[in-house]
Amino acid sequence: MYSIKQVVEMLDIPSVTLRAWENRYQAVVPERTESGYRLYNQENIEDLRWLKEQTDNKGISISHAVRMLKQHKQKDLDERLSVAGGDPKDALDKMRQQIYAALLDIQGERADALIDFGFSLYGYEAMVHQVLVPVLVKVGDAWEQGKATVAQEHYMTHMISNRLSQFFHVFPVYAHLQKVIAFCPAGEHHQIGLLLFSLFLRRNGVEVIYLGSNTPEDGVMELLAKQERIGAVCLSVTNGTLVPYTEKLLERIGSQYPEMQLIAGGKAYEAISLQETKATYVMAEPPERWQAWFDQEFAGIRHRA
């Protein structure tokens, strides 16, 4: 791993240029220490070296060079998937089955090793949305059908949730974007959907204050009163009986903070339209449409000073 100072010296790219490439074009996504310092791995170095070659020696704009790089990396991923499993869908399906079987048998070390291998081979997007999320869905189905015990369901869900939570410290935060408080209201214990949406926001540079499941209202209000630059509240509800309470909570937050954006999602809100809720947005779209929503609706919202 390399610090930003080492990368600047190694590649002869000014630090201000490096930060601009990251913040404006997401050229690379370095890891972050707990103190917020950037750490670059060897793949980041190779990508930056390639981008510098395109801009300095070939006269290509950085925006176009980044698009070329991402297209190349996607093509490379497709080729590796084909080599690994003959067909990309078959390779990912095999990975899902292996991780699910390891977790079902409470083989934590094997599951962790498989997940590590999957991230190194397939990358973040494919592993999260095409492997780990389907595994979570399968876990829930197995529990409902009596094929998995409560202990197995809790263990499997906890293992995957912990792996996903690790990414909160990897993606950079962009100061010009609003902060978001994310939580499940009191009585709601299913937080996977909230976690995935919060990770999506985090991957787009949003600082997310993640409170998790079964969060008391007093704690949320206290944070809203004390924290600065919060522009949105995001909550997730799967239990339909909690919708009336959630709507009253949204109304209380909205009346106290009228400029606050209120984002509601989860299974309980799938059939609720904007006309039926106090929320500003109802996130019923599938994950593949979240980016379009973010670019059109969220990125331009100013935070509360």
Image (cartoon, rainbow, N blue to C red):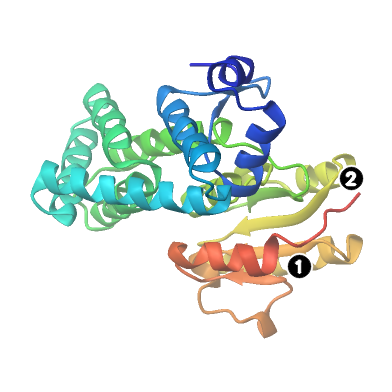
Question: Is tag 1's residue or tag 2's residue first in the polypeptide sequence?
Answer: 2
Name above or below for residue 50 compared with residue 24.
above
Percent across and percent down for residue 266 are 52, 63
Extreme residue in the left direction: 86
User: Which of the 4 image quadrants contains residue 215?
Assistant: top right
Amino acid at pointer 1: Lys
Q: Residue at left 42%, top 33%?
A: 163
- Residue 147 versus residue 242 in the image, above or below: above
The circle drawn on residue 217 is none
Number of residues whose C-alpha sits closer than 10 Å to that of mark 1, classed few (under 14), some (14–19) or many (20 or more): few
Taking depth in this image into account, of 71 and 104 the one nearest to the observer is 71
Q: Position of residue 130 (x, y in %)?
A: 31, 53
Vertically, is 47 above or below 232? above
Residue found at x 84% / y 46%: 229
Image point 61% across, 27% down: which residue?
A: 13
Report how many numbered discs are placed on residues in the image. Answer: 2
Residue on which disc 1 sits: 248
Q: Is residue 254 left or right of residue 84?
A: right
Question: What is the secondary structure assignment of the residue under circle 1?
Answer: helix
- Examine the image and state in which quarter residue 127 appears: top left
Where disc 2 sits, the SS reads helix
Tell which of 28 and 190 is nearer to you.
28
Question: On the rendered structure, is 148 left or right of 300?
Answer: left
Q: Is residue 284 visible?
A: yes
Look at the numbered discs 1 and 2 and tell me whether their residues touch, using CB distance below 8 Å. Answer: no
Percent from the top left, x then y, of residue 179?
75, 47
With respect to residue 275, does 290 lie above or below? above
Residue under label 2? 225
Residue at horizontal 32 percent and vertical 38 percent from the top? 156
